[in-house]
């Protein structure tokens, strides 16, 4: 029995171990199922988070691209540099306004790209107490206005500077026009007063000088003096008339006419009035007929002023005046006058159209000013050149 009891005890122990193992297996299976369920839930949560992150990244990428496209489409130049002074953003408008390529500017120090003193006010924002700067500066012949500001992060720390550049050439032209209009208004007021005070006694001088010329025989010693008085008084009267015509308020009478036919008539009329055997007018055009809305009276006077200037510039030896009319891409008319006269210094090109500026000893300086006034009425442009081959060239461009 002793051995049987011993075997029974062992069997009981084995049975208990088996039960314990079964129970452990059940618990392990339950724990495994619980862990599997938790893992699956966490996997789903991670997948959801991953989708959200992906969507956020896509949204940020789209927003970044959208903002980048906006910056590229702006007319204003945008330049951004960080606390290290290196440029990190340089849009297309900044390239156009500064004449500096983006490849050259990006990752370069701001002072290296813009070394002049006029750029110091923007760069000094980085380490200074001021947060904004405004002003004007030049990139070659391009006038540019700028507005610069510090950039701050969420903690209020400076992380860089943004500079906005914008074209102010139109504003410059407008200021110049306003100054010219103000000057002309004052000139007109003065001209009216002077003309009133001078013309009355001048009429008497001309009248008495004409009487002297009539009464004095041609061989009289004073006949020549009377003729000089009359000529000088008439010249002064002409100057006063030109001055009044220049300053008076003119309202153009626009009519639609054949511009080529009109030009030929002006040339023919001018040639008949000026018997100048040494002067040859060469007219060329690639247009048979073109209708253009303009004031023929003002244009005639403008053409005559330019042609008279050309003849005077070619005296006394004479020369050739070339006049051409061409259409540019169907959008504008280009009228060119070129003579073989003495010409003028290239530095005078811009000054020629200012009132009272003249390169001739006896000139009044109003003829070309009146021409520019006429061209302005028709929303055109006029410029002067002194070609390398000599002579003078005046080019008028009129919008069609």
Image (cartoon, grey):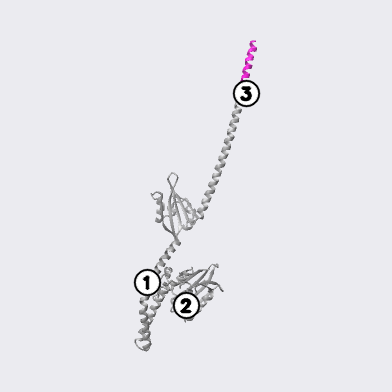
**N-terminal-most mark, 2 or 3:** 3
Q: Nearer the viewer, mark 2 or mark 3?
A: 3
Give the residue number, with chain letter if any, for mark 3. Answer: 22
**N-terminal-most mark, 1 or 3:** 3
Please identify the quarter of the rendering in which residue 245 is found. bottom left
Give the residue number, with chain letter if any, for mark 1. Answer: 190
**SS assignment at label 1:** helix
In the rendered view, would you say 44 is above or below 79?
A: above
Stretch of the chain drawn in magenta:
1-25
Q: Nearer the viewer, mark 1 or mark 2?
A: 1
**SS assignment at label 3:** helix
Decide: few, some or many residues near mark 2? Use Cα within 10 Å; few <14, some 14-19, many ≥20.
many
- 203 in the magenta segment: no
Looking at the image, can residue 345 be seen? no
- Real-space Cα distance between discs 2 and 3? 126 Å
- 12 in the magenta segment: yes
- Real-space Cα distance between discs 1 and 2? 39 Å
**SS assignment at label 2:** strand
Quadrant holding the N terminus: top right
Number of marks in picture: 3
Observer-nearest of 158 and 96: 158
Decide: few, some or many residues near mark 1? Use Cα within 10 Å; few <14, some 14-19, many ≥20.
few
Q: Where is residue 331? Give x, y as percent.
A: 54, 67
* Residues at discs 1 and 2 in contact (Cβ within 8 Å): no
Q: Which mark is residue 319?
A: 2
Q: Nearer the viewer, mark 1 or mark 3?
A: 1
From the image, give the main secondary structure of the stretch colored magenta. Answer: helix
């Amino acid at each position: 029995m002793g051995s049987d009891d011993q075997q029974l005890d062992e069997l009981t122990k084995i049975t208990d171990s088996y039960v314990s193992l079964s129970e452990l297996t059940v618990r392990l299976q339950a724990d495994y199922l619980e862990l599997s369920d938790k893992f699956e839930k966490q996997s789903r949560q991670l997948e959801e988070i991953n989708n959200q992150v992906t969507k956020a990244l896509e949204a940020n990428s789209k927003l970044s691209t959208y903002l980048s496209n906006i910056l590229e489409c702006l007319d204003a130049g945008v330049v951004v540099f960080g606390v290290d002074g290196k440029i990190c953003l340089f849009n297309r408008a900044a390239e156009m306004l500064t004449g500096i390529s983006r490849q050259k500017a990006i990752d370069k120090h701001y002072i290296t790209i813009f070394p002049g003193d006029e750029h110091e006010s923007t760069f000094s924002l980085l380490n200074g107490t001021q947060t904004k700067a405004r002003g004007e500066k030049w990139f070659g012949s391009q006038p540019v206005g700028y507005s610069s500001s510090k950039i701050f992060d969420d903690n209020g720390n400076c992380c860089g500077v943004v500079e906005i550049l914008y074209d102010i050439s139109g504003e410059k032209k407008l200021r110049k026009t306003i100054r010219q209009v103000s000057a002309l208004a004052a000139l007109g007021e003065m001209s009216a007063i002077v003309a009133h005070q001078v013309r009355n006694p001048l009429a008497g001088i001309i009248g008495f000088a004409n009487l002297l010329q009539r009464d004095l025989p041609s061989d009289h010693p004073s006949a020549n003096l009377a003729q000089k008085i009359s000529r000088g008084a008439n010249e002064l009267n002409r100057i006063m008339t030109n001055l009044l015509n220049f300053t008076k308020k003119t309202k153009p009478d626009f009519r639609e006419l054949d511009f080529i036919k009109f030009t030929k008539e002006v040339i023919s009329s001018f040639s008949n009035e000026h018997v100048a055997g040494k002067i040859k007018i060469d007219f060329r055009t690639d247009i048979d007929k073109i209708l253009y809305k303009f004031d023929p009276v003002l244009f005639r006077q403008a053409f005559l002023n330019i042609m008279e200037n050309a003849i005077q510039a070619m005296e006394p030896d004479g020369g050739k005046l070339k006049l051409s009319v061409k259409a540019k891409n169907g959008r504008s008319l280009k009228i060119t006058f070129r003579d073989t006269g003495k010409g003028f210094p290239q530095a005078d090109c811009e000054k020629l159209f200012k009132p009272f500026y003249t390169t001739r000893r006896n000139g009044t300086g109003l003829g070309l000013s009146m021409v520019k006034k006429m061209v302005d009425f028709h929303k055109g442009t006029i410029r002067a050149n002194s070609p390398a081959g000599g002579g003078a060239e005046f080019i008028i461009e009129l919008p069609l």
